[in-house]
């Protein structure tokens, strides 16, 4: 089917299904949720490599995070999720772990981590660690032993298949990082599976020894006082038979069984937040994984909006439909509200910068960044701010020579090998490449944005750090940073943004995302213009007045006539209706 036709039909179906669906208006009873501290919490993702360098080696580290805890406390976040800091060969920047129970020397040591946890707790900030349990590094002692011989005790820690009768690969599965998903190992005359880079061999969860090793790993960090675990692509723990399609990656029933066992064995014994990045799980079955009654995990980290704005290839950017964008958030709310808990996310370390993707990082940089803050922090689910979004960090003007990300490098080489001109594919690769989110945090306008005292940071600093940086924005009462602080206070002061029901107004409007949140007699209207145009929006509330506004991202007054708002580009506001 023609892709444009398919997307049009999908939009119609989504519109029809949501328009005809009965609204979920029964409020969650928060009285039985008080022990779940994370439901009222606001998260902040720290991409450790790029956050703050305390040693002058050009790479962020654990002490660098500790140095910035007062900044995070002042921002108002409740917990930080730290990306992997374990020993790694850094093929995938830490998501290829070689030792699950240690700290990579470039980030510090175990004592540094323990001190970070202690200091964060003293300041009222909780810590989440990132567990990569679907694969290891090929430099892991497990894999080095596993590939040496079929009778090695570690051999069955990984997924192996024999060559075909003609000596070929077991099947045609393709890696998510380009190329075949199989790599030949001469010592055993077998192929091992790697869903990502060839240096990231897939673990075999069918082996109970593997499951025990990973359970012990989770316990190791929880016993060090961490407050939760974020599980990377955790549903890839269960894989289809090689005769089946790779479309089933993440969709196998055993994924839930394995997680339930992990929860029973370890996770349930701690008062923690667990969040799963779960490919293959959607709003229709998510309650089986994160349901309040029986879910193995507490929340799902869903990134479905990242499928928008391309033609099926993430590096082929297109305009996106706001109706489809609304549909994704609404479907997750409809599927989980009152049953389990989701997350609210606009970007992370694997995506382009939010303001560059969903806003306008040039003409309307400040209002669009503030609009996105308004939207994110009024959504249902645990919100995650990605480092730098609170100051409006943007995509960077990177070149091929600047690339550090394995996905970008592999894709570039694949396109060149296929004879595709750079002019065809490179603009999209630069716009959507993961390195955009990984440029160093911009603390001030000194060399390397105050991130490091080294001559060069590990990744090129965005040159706009001279104007976009924390120090500048802390001094400006109208900055994006100070708007984030205000919006965080609005969310925390009003339980409706945590527990309230949600209802979209004028779902089919392609410019404005407006919705209400209502809880225990209080009702709020959130209006966000997602486009860089002036547009009129009828709220359907004739008595709407300016004096009901809690927060607004423009200094000029809101133009309201008989319930209709004449919205400026990327204008956003929240009204308290009752």
Image (cartoon, grey):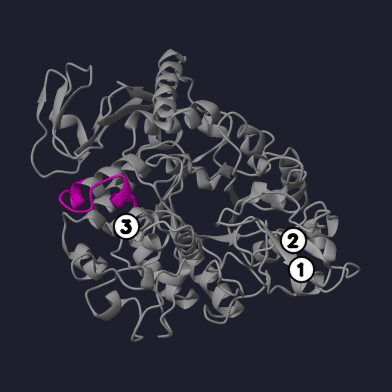
The magenta segment is 353-367
Specify the label residue 192 is tagged with.
2
302 in relation to 29, above or below: below
Q: Is residue 445 left or right of residue 48?
A: left
Q: Position of residue 402 (x, y in %)?
A: 37, 72
Q: Report, in whole angstroms, how far the alpha carbon at label 1 lies from the one at label 2.
A: 7 Å
Using the rendered image of the protein, determine whether residue 79 is visible from the camera's viewpoint: yes
Label 3–label 1 contact, CB within 8 A: no
Residue under label 1, please give it.
185
Using the rendered image of the protein, determine whether residue 124 is visible from the camera's viewpoint: no
Specify the label residue 423 is tagged with.
3
208 in relation to 60, above or below: above
Q: Is residue 361 magenta?
A: yes
Number of residues whose C-alpha sits closer than 10 Å to that of mark 2, classed few (under 14), some (14–19) or many (20 or more): many
Q: Nearer the viewer, residue 510 or 500?
A: 510
* Residue mark closest to the camera, 3 vs 2: 3
Which of the 4 quarters of the picture holds residue 32? top right
Q: Is residue 445 left or right of residue 27?
A: left
Q: Position of residue 335 (x, y in %)?
A: 54, 27
């Amino acid at each position: 089917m023609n892709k444009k036709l398919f997307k049009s039909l999908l939009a119609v179906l989504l519109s029809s299904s949501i328009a005809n669906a009965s609204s979920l208006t029964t409020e969650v009873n928060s009285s039985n949720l008080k022990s779940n501290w994370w439901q009222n919490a606001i998260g902040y993702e720290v991409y450790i490599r790029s956050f703050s360098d305390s040693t002058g080696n050009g790479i962020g580290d654990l002490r660098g995070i500790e140095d910035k805890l007062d900044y995070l406390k002042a921002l108002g976040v409740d917990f930080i999720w730290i990306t992997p800091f374990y020993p790694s060969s850094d093929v995938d920047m830490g998501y290829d772990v070689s030792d699950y129970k240690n700290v990579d020397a470039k980030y510090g040591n175990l004592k540094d981590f323990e001190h970070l946890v202690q200091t964060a707790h003293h300041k009222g900030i909780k810590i989440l660690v990132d567990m990569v349990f679907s694969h290891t590094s090929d430099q892991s002692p497990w894999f080095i032993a596993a590939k040496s011989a079929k009778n090695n005790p570690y051999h069955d820690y990984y997924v192996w298949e024999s060559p075909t009768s003609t000596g070929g690969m077991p099947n045609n599965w393709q890696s998510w990082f380009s190329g075949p998903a199989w790599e030949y190992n001469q010592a055993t005359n077998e192929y091992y599976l790697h869903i990502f880079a060839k240096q990231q061999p897939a673990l075999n969860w069918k082996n109970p020894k593997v499951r025990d090793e990973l359970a012990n790993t989770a316990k190791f960090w929880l016993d060090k006082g961490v407050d939760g675990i974020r599980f990377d692509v955790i549903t890839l723990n269960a894989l289809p038979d090689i005769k089946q399609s790779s479309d089933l990656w993440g969709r196998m029933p055993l994924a839930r069984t394995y997680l339930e066992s992990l929860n029973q064995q370890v996770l349930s014994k701690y008062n923690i937040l667990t969040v799963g990045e779960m490919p293959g799980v959607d709003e229709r079955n998510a309650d089986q994984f994160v349901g309040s009654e029986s879910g193995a995990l507490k929340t799902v980290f869903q990134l479905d909006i990242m499928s928008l704005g391309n033609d099926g290839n993430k590096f082929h950017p297109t305009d996106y439909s706001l109706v489809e964008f609304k549909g994704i958030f609404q479907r997750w709310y409809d599927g989980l509200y009152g049953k389990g808990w989701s997350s609210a996310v606009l970007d992370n370390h694997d995506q382009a910068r939010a303001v560059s993707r969903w806003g306008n990082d040039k003409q309307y940089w400040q209002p669009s960044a503030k609009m996105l803050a308004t939207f994110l922090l009024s959504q249902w689910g645990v919100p995650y701010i990605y480092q730098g979004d609170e100051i409006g960090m943007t995509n960077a003007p990177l070149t091929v020579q600047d690339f550090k990300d394995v996905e970008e490098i592999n894709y570039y080489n694949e396109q060149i090998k296929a004879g595709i001109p750079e002019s065809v594919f490179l603009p999209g690769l630069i716009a959507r490449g993961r390195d955009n989110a990984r440029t160093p945090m911009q603390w001030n306008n000194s060399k390397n944005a105050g991130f490091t005292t080294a001559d060069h940071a590990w990744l090129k600093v965005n040159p706009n750090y001279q104007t976009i940086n924390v120090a500048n924005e802390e001094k400006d009462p109208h900055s994006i940073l100070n708007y984030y602080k205000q919006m965080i206070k609005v969310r925390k002061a009003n339980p409706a943004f945590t527990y309230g029901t949600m209802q979209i107004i004028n779902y089919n409007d392609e410019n404005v995302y407006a919705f209400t949140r209502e809880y225990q007699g209080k009702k709020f209207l959130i209006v966000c213009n997602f486009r860089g145009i002036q547009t009129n929006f009828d709220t359907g509330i004739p008595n709407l007045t300016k004096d009901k506004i809690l927060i607004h991202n423009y200094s000029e007054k809101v133009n309201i006539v008989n319930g209709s708002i004449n919205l400026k580009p990327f204008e956003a506001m929240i009204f308290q209706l009752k």
